[in-house]
Image (cartoon, rainbow, N blue to C red):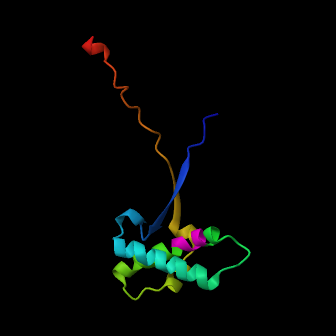
Amino acid sequence: MADEPELEQYIEIDGVEVDMEDFTFREQREVRRLVYEEVTLERDRDKPWEQQMFSDIYPAILCVYMRRAKPSASLDEALDLKARDVIKERAVAPPTKRASGGRSAAKR
């Protein structure tokens, strides 16, 4: 039986992949601010801060992305989205083989 491919998660909204590396520094800062404020205000003292931060990062990313098209988009709008509708999985491409850097047979 062949090995199962490794999967990675990504965010997609309206058929477009949302990648934080495409965000401006200002947008990235806004994501951090939204996550910090949400976790600070709603923090469950029995859960580690990092665990709660991770669960709030997707809505924050989506909110900031949605503001590109609709500046008045709110975090509540992003929180109303369903994870299965925006969090997708895909197979990770296997690493490509690289030349060893040694002399090839053709040069001998």
Residue plotted at (41% across, 72% down)? 28
Which is more toward the observer, 94 or 82? 94
Q: Residue 12: within the magenta?
A: no
Instruction: Name above or below for residue 69 compared with residue 47.
Output: below
Residue plotted at (38% across, 75% down)? 27
Query: Where are the magenta residues, as a range?
Result: 53-58
Q: Residue 56: within the magenta?
A: yes
Which is more toward the observer, 41 or 66? 41
Q: Position of residue 51 (x, y in %)?
A: 64, 68
Q: Look at the image and tell me in which quarter the C terminus lies.
A: top left
Residue plotted at (42% across, 71% down)? 14
Q: Is residue 80 visible?
A: no
- Please name the predominant secondary structure of the magenta segment in the image: helix
Instruction: Name above or below for residue 1 compared with residue 57.
Output: above
Q: Position of residue 83 (x, y in %)?
A: 57, 70
Q: Is residue 79 visible?
A: yes
Q: Position of residue 52 (x, y in %)?
A: 63, 72
Residue plotted at (70% across, 72% down)? 47
Q: Position of residue 29 (x, y in %)?
A: 41, 75
